[in-house]
Every structure is written in structure tokens, then in C-alpha cells.
Amino acid sequence: MDSERIPVITGLGAVTPLGTDAVSSWAGLIAGRDAEGPLTLFSTEGCRAHRAAMAALPPLPGRTAKELSRLGRASRLAIPAAREALAGAGLLDPAGRSRLPILSLALSTTGGGMGFGEEFLRALGRRRARLLGPAARYQPQQQVLDLQRELAVAGPSFLVANACASGANALGHAAALVRAGAAECVLAGGFEALSELIFTGFDCLQATTTERCRPFDLNRSGLLLGEGAAFFVVETEAHARRRGAAPLCRLTGYGHTTDLYHLTQPEPEGSALVEVMARAARQAGVSPAEIGYVNAHGTATPVNDGAEARAYVRFFGEALGGARISSTKAAIGHTLGAAGAIEACFTIQALRAQRLPVQLNLRDPIPEIAAALVRDPAPPRPFAHALSVNLGFGGSNAALLFSQP
Amino acid sequence: MKLDLAIVGQGAVTPAGVGAAAFAREPRAEAVPFVGQPEKSWPAFRVDPQAPALARWRGEPRLRRASPISFFLVEAAEQCLAGLSAEERRATGLVVAFSTGSLVYSRRFYAAVAREGRGAASPALFPETVFNSPVSHVAAALGLGGAAYALVGDETAWIAALKTAWLWLREKEVARVVVLGAEEFDPIVLDVYRAAGWLRRGSRFVPSEGAGGVLVRAAEADDANILTEGEDGFPYRSRREAEDAAQRALIGIEPAHVALPSARRNWLAPVEAAATASRPAADPGPYLGEAFAASAAWATLRALSQLDTHSKILQPVWGLNHQIGTLQFAKRRSS
């Protein structure tokens, strides 16, 4: 690959259940905090599970209550995270607008403005026609429009809804745009707000836990849902250099494929995940032994974590002993369409800080990867490369490889 | 964005018919009552689910519980892939553009929860409500081994889908990509469109459903039917902004380029008429109603069908609630 066109990350931002920005989210994570708590955004009466990881909405100064209600929860999570990423890259003006008026967007979600959709359905059920206005703001392109409006940007947009791998897909797409010369700079990210329909859906599948969320534990019993957003400025190394921006890391590898085994379950040996990790490593020119940390998908469902653990054994081989793996979903929950983005953010922070998020709530680890699960924030050796991997409904699998600049 | 894609396969499921019949005539509309006001109705174009070309997929295991949109998609995709071996299909990617996705099951799932409580939520329905479930079904049913993406947006998601295919081909991830647009109708959309102000008195807008698509690969020297450019990124939030966006979207495109009318009877039709008034027009064919990305795909198929008459065709893509974009097609790569 033309070294001038290697994608670099020059800014990142996040709103997570652990904090209203990337710095506080990382601080909470590395301190071993978790954000699990009672879900109070909507009633969970009739559900098995009643807990989730909710994010506090950062303030949006200068907005009236009416304007804020029009933005909806998903946009309220996305806009501050996007601004933080642009600010970190030196691309935000004092009024909170992008300094680049034309800016490509590569975004992800699964629920979009689902809260508006639910409001609409409730109003429709009560035959309250005058309350139907929010319906128009349900579709995810409305959150794209909100971002474009708030950041004062125009330009191409890409919005992927590939279930839980979507956030990684958005970042991978941004990298491909940059490599192809189709864009010099892309704002990439994912956002997801907790919603009644999705919470009820996972609950009826009995995928949510009523206990602690225990990724990669033999006694894991299900996932914890969460919400949040994470954004990145992805640009060519040359573009960053020209404007004097310092890269936080390089996005050196991306692999994605579809597991055709089952709509909601991975193939038990994790073959698709092995393939995407191998592709990402091949694109980066990195061997498994050089990868020091993996931010795993680790939903804590019985089926996912078993297949994922087998995939790590197969991908790393003898190098598994030198790798460290953890799922951060025990701390922030499963943020679905934002998961790939938020977890990429944590992966980059781990790479930069040379500190690792410990595997929370671990009692009896899956034996095959027990030695690799993170128990100590200090890595066993310095590392220059880190992976973030995601799997999703529909067989979406994706891996992102980040390298030190 | 410059693209260089050869279109080597096509497929369509419309309310007028399937395959060659898809563009033969204007479908007959049926009057559908509003959910919130059943005493009133609005015309809609519906795909006949009993059509043999769709019914033949009922035995496919992955489609056992699937929503109508999966049937539209799998049939359109199979038309695109006709003649390809299993090995060639394994080297094929899939990108699908939606606006509302699996709406029928989403509404049904939520209605059951509202009626009977959360404890009665259906674990069979919920996975089918996820945007990329129909995409996964199509990939599994047809043995497509490349990546599979679900993209969301208004009509312009069709442009994003074609650009995504170009990136995958450029990076040599796959040998070819099936790109589809799809939408399914549920009566609830009438209430949504009315809330959005699209069904005012005098409007001739007809909600529709179906799928359309193309099979693309990297263009070679002697290929015909080339997609040469695709641009989105002209967002708007009011009619006035839409007029400005339309002007900006068309800047720099040769005035002699034949334009395919595609806004037809939606609220952007006057904007389109003003923006393309000075250009010769291609034949848009029979009106098939509004089905967002599916409509954009159908317009592309109409454009391709006229490349023998016009060597270059401009397809403006009028996104109804986000942005405006353009696609450009040429008969030959060098033209």
C-alpha cells in the first residue's frame, strides 16, 4: 500500500455509560468500574432482565428544550462524541462546527431513532394523530442529518446497520475510502441508544442476563445491554501531516465477512472470526505474535463466547500465550451498533497507554483462553499492535487492527 | 466519486411483476386503510406474494420465518446472479440499501408487546426485525461468500451501496458484488407518510414495495453498461434547501447528458423539473410508486435499458428525507 495513504486516526471521542467523553470513559474502564444499574429509561415490566448500562447525556449548550427533544437520544449521544473527535484532531471551531465544510461520514447504528418509532407506535395505538410527528425522525438518516446540521458539514454519508459488527464496519469503510483516495478525511463512528423494542427483543430471546455479565466465564449467562457513541477522525497520513495533526495510531488492517451458519449464532468453531482476524493481520503485514491486545466481542452469551474463544485459539496458535484478551462489555454493556466503534476507541487507548482493561466479573474462565484473559492492567510486554473484533446477528464478522504511529 | 463498474446482471421485483414484467405497465393500486384512521384509505402498490417467482423460495430453510422483503430480495438477487456457478457465488459480495427494512415484523413485534405485554414478545419475530437479517438470508440462500452489508437511508442509500461495491472491488475483496435496494409495505407507512406531510390532498404519491438490483464487477476495456460516477452528499431539511441541493448536485454534469426523471409523483418532483428542465429526458417508464432505495434501483434499471438510445444517462437520485445525489451511466467505458 502507498504509505502516504495509510489511514491514521487523529481524533477520537466517546460517550459511554462510564463517562461523557473518551478520557473519562477510559479512566473508568481502566479503574475497573462498571456501569450496570437499573434501567429507568422505560418500563421493563414483564421482562426477565431489568438492568442495563445507561449513559448520561452530555449537555448541548445553547439548545432549547424543544430543540433537544427533536434531536432524540441517539443524536444526543452521537453529537458530543463527534465533536470530541473533531476537537482532538484540531478540526472543531469554537462554535462547535467542523473546520472542514465538506466531510465524509461513515456511520453505524442498529436502532437509529427507535425511541421516536416507539413514541409513534404508542400514539398510533391511542389514535392520537397529532402526536405522530416524531415518526418522521425515526429513520437513522435523520441522525445523520442531525450530525451534519450540528457540525455544519455536507458531503457523502454511509450508514451501515450490520447488527453488532456495524461500528467496526463503519471504521473499516472509512479506512477503505481513505486508501482509495475517495476521501482525504472521514468522520467515522457509531451510535446506539437503549430502546424498549430492542431491550424487549433481546430479553425475549433470553440473551440478556439476570445476573452479572461474565464474558468468557464458564458460568456466563447472557449479555448486559448498553448505549453510547464513539467517533474518529480518519485521514491519510499525508493529510494529517500537511495540517500538522499528530496521529494517535494507524488503522493498518481491516477484515470483514459473513458467517452463513445461522441467523443469530456463530459457527461453533469461530471460522469466520478467524478469517477476518487473518485478513486484518495480512493487510497490516503483522503476525499474530505481534498483537499484544485483543478487545474481544465477548457478549457473555453461552454460544458467542465459546465460538469466539475457539477462534482465538485457532488464530493465535502458539502465540496465544503472549496475547491478552478482554471484553469490555461487562463494564459498559453491549452497545450493539456502537459496540465496534466504542470498543475500537478502548483498543486505541490501550495501545497508546500500554494499559489493558481487565476482564471484569471473571470467576471460572474458559480454559482454552484462561491464560490470555486480562487480569492485570500492565501488559506482559510492550506492544505495537492491537485488535478489536466484533460479531453480530446475520453473521457479520469484522476485525480492526490498530498500530502505533 | 469516479466509479468504473460494469453492470453484468440485473434483477427486479415490482408491483407490476417480476423480471422482464417488472416494468411492463403501471400496477393497479389498492386502497389501504390508515392504521390510525381506518375509515380513510390511500392507494398503494403491492407486490403479489403468490407470484410463482416469489413462491418458489418458500421451501428455502432460511426464509421459513422471513418477512416479505427477504423474498423480494432473494428473487431479485437470483436474477442478477443467473448463470453463475457456486464457486463464482462464493467470491461474490452483497450490499443492500433499505429505508425502513423489515417493517412488517417490526410493527407486528411491537404490536404484540403493546397488546399482551413484554412477556409475550416473540423470540421468533425479533431477529427478523434487525436490518441485516434479510441480507443474511439472501447470502445464505444463494451461497454468497463475500461480505454482506445492510445500508440505511433514503433513496440515496442506493448510491452509497454502489460506492461500497466499488470499494470492495477496488480492494479485490471479492470478484463481483450484488447491489440491491428493497422496501416492504405495511399499512403503518401511510400514517407515517401522512405525518411527514407527503399525503396531502391532491398528492398522487403512491407508496410501493419490491426490490431491484444489479450485479457489478470492475469494468474491463470492452465492457458495456458502465456506472461511471456516483455522488451523494447534498443534504437538505426544507424545500428551499432541497432546491439549492439539487442545483449543487447537478453542477459540472454535462448539460447535454440525458436525465432520467425519477422523482415522479413525490414532493420533490417540482424540484426535479426545475433542476433538469434544460436537459433532454430519458423515458422513465411506467410509474411504480415510491419504495425508496428500491425505487432508485428501478430507476437505474430503466436508465440501463436506454443506453442503446442514449450513450450517457444521468440518474438524479431524489432522497425524500435526507439528501440528493446523482449516478451517471455510459454505454461504453470509453464513451
Image (cartoon, rainbow, N blue to C red):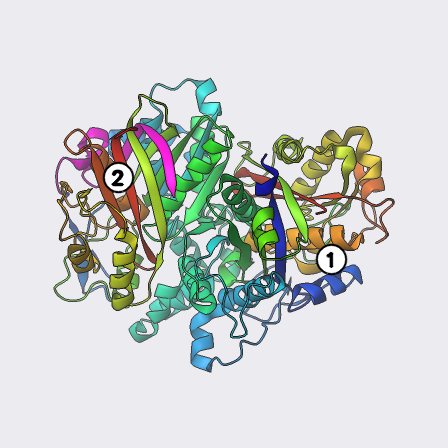
Q: Which residues are magenta?
A: B1-26
* Left or right of residue A401, residue B136 in this image: left
Q: Quadrant of the N terminus of chain A?
A: top right
Amino acid type of disc 2? Thr
Identify the amino acid type marked 1: Arg
Residue designated by label 1: A212
- In the image, is residue B242 above or below residue B224? below
- Give A209 or A271, whichever is nearer the viewer: A271
- Mark 2 belongs to chain: B
Along the line of sight, the residue nearer the viewer: B205 or A86 = A86
Q: Which residue, given by chain and number where applicable, does mark 2 sit on?
A: B300
Q: Is residue A281 left or right of residue B8?
A: right
The answer to whether residue A196 is above or below residue B43 is below
Q: Give the crowd class for mark 1: few <14, some 14-19, many >=20 residues within 10 Å.
A: some
Picture residue at 60% right of the left edge, 47% below the top: A237
**Which residue is depicted at the point 66% across and 53% down?**
A247
Residue at horizontal 37 percent and vertical 48 percent from the top: B157
